Amino acid sequence: MGKQTTQTETVTSLEHLETVVDSDFHLSEQQDDFLSYLPSPFHDMLFHESRDIPMGYLKDFYPTAGLLTPVATGNVEMNKVRSQADIIEGKDLLNVDRAIVTPTLNLYLGGVHHDDLAAALAHAYNEWVLDEIYNPDEGIYGPVVVAPQKPQEAAAEIEDRAGEDGIVSVFIPSGGVHPPLGNEQYFPIYAAAENAGLPVQLHSASGTQMLSFPLQFHGSNRYLSNHAPTHAMVHMTHLTDMITRGVPVRFPDLDIVFQEAGLGWVPYMTRRLDNEYSEKRSDAPMLEKMPSEYVDDQFYFTSQPVEGAKDPDYIGPIVGLMGPDNLMFSSDYPHLDFDHSDYLFSALRSNFESSDVANVYGQTALEIYDF
Amino acid sequence: MTTTDDSPETESLHYVADVDEITDGDRVIVDVEGREIAVFNVDGAFHALSNYCIHQGGPACEGLISGSLEVDDEMELTYDSTNKVVSCPWHGWEFEIESGEHLAPTDYRLPTYRVVVQDGAVYLDSY
Ligand code: FES
């Protein structure tokens, strides 16, 4: 870090880079940190210094999915990051020059059910980070956090904070937010961010996401905004749940075919699952091999609607990564988005052996269906 | 692995602690020529593992020592409460202390070292 790169030098480590920025470095704020900054009437109602509840009663206002996580079980000791000193320690550990510091408890702000309280919590958080945390001299920057439940207040919060030292963006805790963030009710937030010249960061939280997962579909009022993500999102959920609960372990001869969600989510999902299983094995202790191996062995995917077929740099690697033996051609004819059989084929034949292409186009189906 | 065999060349032994300083279910971490090695006592047997996590370099052996959630033949969840697993405090990768194997996937492992017990003291061998 801090070292100038010259033309002849090869960049082989962080050390060679002029500036390393971590654009999502989290605080682990607790109520004691920011509750005293709550505006009225919530300050009067909720802030009692005499209350001594270690995890904080504030947690009650944020939704939780009640999941058993490695943090909850104590397997991971999440470092405390509640002061500039904690951040500097973390930056040193990670070798970064600048950190964009984002919240943890307040990732759940988008799911808080009391709208006015949500806006007040966002305000209190911002007061705290501006007072005690952000410090450009130490490379500590961060967003204005806003509660999407109250867009007008959020816009005012952005206007008030935009010029302050260390503010670099606007942060919307996006998990669980309903309706989805394209709704015009949020436009004041975007207008304020644009006026202030600040980018908007969306950061979801797994615990809140599923709380409004089906509702979000009701809230998206365009066909495209439903159709593009829906098939893959639903299948990601089913595939993960089936593997986690051991369906392929319990039914080792069962083949499972996922249809009509395209390709790219499959290599993404298998790798994501393998990573996560390595950290959270106790969510699926019956597995005898890696999630991706179950997918390889027992899960199949029909091709339509193929995305990126005109992009030779896409189809080859993606099909290679998902495994051509797990892919079966489908057209979905005569639906609106059906794929002509030539469409995938021309993309495949330049990238794969004819036996792979033959498998995609029928051999695999012959094996797994009871023709 | 623990051995009470007193044949190995004494100069290769690196003193870790007296036997009674590593209580059952606990560990001590020593620095041997710049490498941190943890010596665990699991049910009276001593095992040594590298403290450098193969995932992203975290202090793997400083984490929680625990049992593990398993399933029985009916796929019902059971908890094996023997303290035989250490979880890296950074991301929770769980390693079986005896073998160094990651519980999932098992083809990852922390390096293990030979432990020798002699005259009431615990030593690492080959150092
Ligand atoms: S560094 Fe050990 S689990 Fe990630």
Image (cartoon, rainbow, N blue to C red):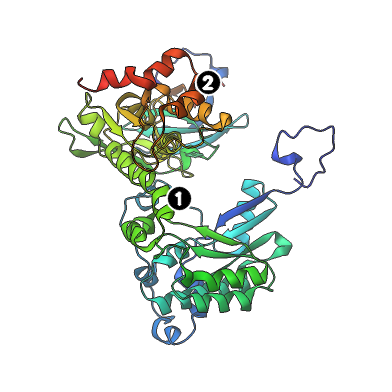
Question: Badge 2 sits on which subunit?
Answer: A
Expressed as whole percent of the image width and height from the top left, the position of residue B9 reads 53, 14
User: Residue A142's quadrant in the figure?
Assistant: bottom right
Question: Badge 1 sits on which subunit?
Answer: A
Residues at badges 1 and 2 in contact (C-beta under 8 Å)? no
Determine the residue positioned at 38% across, 67% down: A62
Determine the residue positioned at 57% across, 18% down: B11
Secondary structure category for the residue under label 2: loop
Query: For the residue carrying disc 2, how many other residues have a C-alpha within 10 Å: few (<14), some (14-19), or many (20+)?
Result: some
Asked if A237 appears above or below B32 in the picture, the reply is below
Amino acid type shown at disc 1: Glu
Determine the residue positioned at 41% across, 48% down: A229
Q: Is mark 2 within 8 Å of ligand 1?
A: no
Secondary structure category for the residue under label 1: loop
Report which residue position mark 1 lands on.
A77
Expressed as whole percent of the image width and height from the top left, the position of residue A95 reads 66, 46
Determine the residue positioned at 35% across, 65% down: A63
User: Residue B83's quadrant in the figure?
Assistant: top left
Judge left or right: residue A97 versus residue B97. Answer: right
As drawn, the residue found furthest toward the right would be A7
Q: Nearer the viewer, residue A245 or A155?
A: A155
Amino acid type shown at disc 2: Asn
Number of numbered discs: 2
Q: Nearer the viewer, residue A206 or A12?
A: A206
